[in-house]
Amino acid sequence: MSYSDKVIDHYNNPRNVGSMDKKDSDVGTGLVGAPECGDVMKLQIKVNPQTNVIEDAKFKTFGCGSAIASSSLATEWVKGKTIDEALAIKNTEIVKELALPPVKIHCSVLAEDAIRAAIGDWRKKQESVKPETVQAAQ
Amino acid sequence: MANAESKLSLVAPPGATPHANSEATPSCWSCGEMRAHHFCGSCGKVQPPSPVDYFAFFGFPRKLDLDTSALEKEFYALSRKLHPDVFGQAADKERSWSLEQSSRLNDAYRTLKDPIKRTEYLLKLEGVELEEQSKQATEQARASGDLKKQVVPPDLLEEVFELNMHLEELRTQKKLGEDDPALLEEIGKAKLSLEEKHDALLNELKAEWEKWDQLADGATNSASDSNRRKILDKMVDVLNRRNYVWNLVRDVNEAIE
């Protein structure tokens, strides 16, 4: 199987690799795994609590090239988006952008899961930090 | 072969019948007697590959606690009989069937002799598609706005992630020609703990095998459909965790070599 140019580009020059302080109340951390291949992916977002805009995103993925490219792309895409906009990202869009073959679709699923998990973690923190401003999780 | 008849009564799983049409008849193409899977029990002619699953191919019931030495014996016996060399003088179709049967034999043997592959294969036969499940769960989470339930427990993910970080560090150090005994020791300890986990997971899997086999024997006559589902789900769960652990053990071994 050969990787697409975009996958190779993300693999060779992954964007936003790194980590943030997961105790920071503005940071949401998503740690997910793909049971099919044993990959593990950590994606973190830093959210501006006033605007709900994701101002920064970092990831670290242990897995195949497609998993790394999917998460690298995911961090690029969520940056500058609001929480709601980020939640609208679908794995199929990642598949399309990276031209992932069917056997690698689960990598894109993993990236979408990671975004959701990071946002979920951030939301949970907001609830416990400022219980009076809790909003329905929509 | 004594179990030829029981084999015939097994229904092939959906999707596993690429040659279904040509194989519809249960009789030998040559002498018209009831045929077995590989050779006619009556005239001994090689038969076209029949659309049966790997368990049935060997004449085994669809059970997981398989007698691997019996499997091996059967494999070697069939290998000899189906070997294309034996069919050098035979008709074209027989030669090509013996080839197809041989390659299927190899696939079946490789799948069934390995406890993990065997379990995964059974799950597939029972219609459990791991990846499909994960995709559906993601779609559901997207639609409902809820968090997807992760199949791998968070603490195991955490452990996997941490150890991967250590391994990466180790690889970097190796490249630079540096040596960090403390790191190596830590990784060694983690490896031991993983191997213990792996053994425990295999035992957990075998416990499910037992339940499954009892069900297959009809020994358990409780509400078998939900029972069946429960056992299959549990096997999926154990396999998922085991995959993680196993990949990691492999990575550790590569890194500390």
Image (spheres, rainbow, N blue to C red):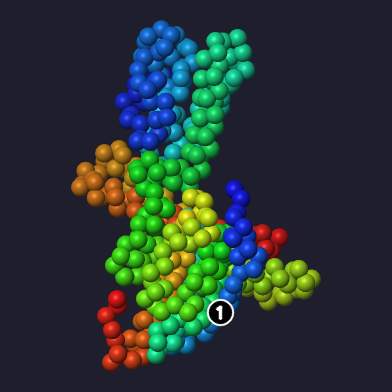
Residue under the image location 42 percent in, 29 percent down: B18
Residue A33 appears at what percent x and percent y? 47, 64
Residue under the image location 43 percent in, 22 percent down: B37
Q: Secondary structure at mark 1?
A: loop
Q: Residue furthest right?
A: B177
Residue B16 appears at what percent x and percent y? 40, 34
Viewer-proximal residue, B101 or A135?
A135
Q: Is residue B45 above or below residue A112?
A: above
Q: Chain of mark 1?
A: A
Q: Is residue B253 above or below residue A30?
A: above
Viewer-proximal residue, B37 or B63?
B37
Q: Which residue is mark 1?
A: A19
Q: Quadrant of residue B88?
A: top right
Residue A129 appears at what percent x and percent y? 36, 90
Mark 1 residue type:
Ser
Residue under the image location 62 percent in, 17 percent down: B85
Q: Quadrant of residue B185?
A: bottom right
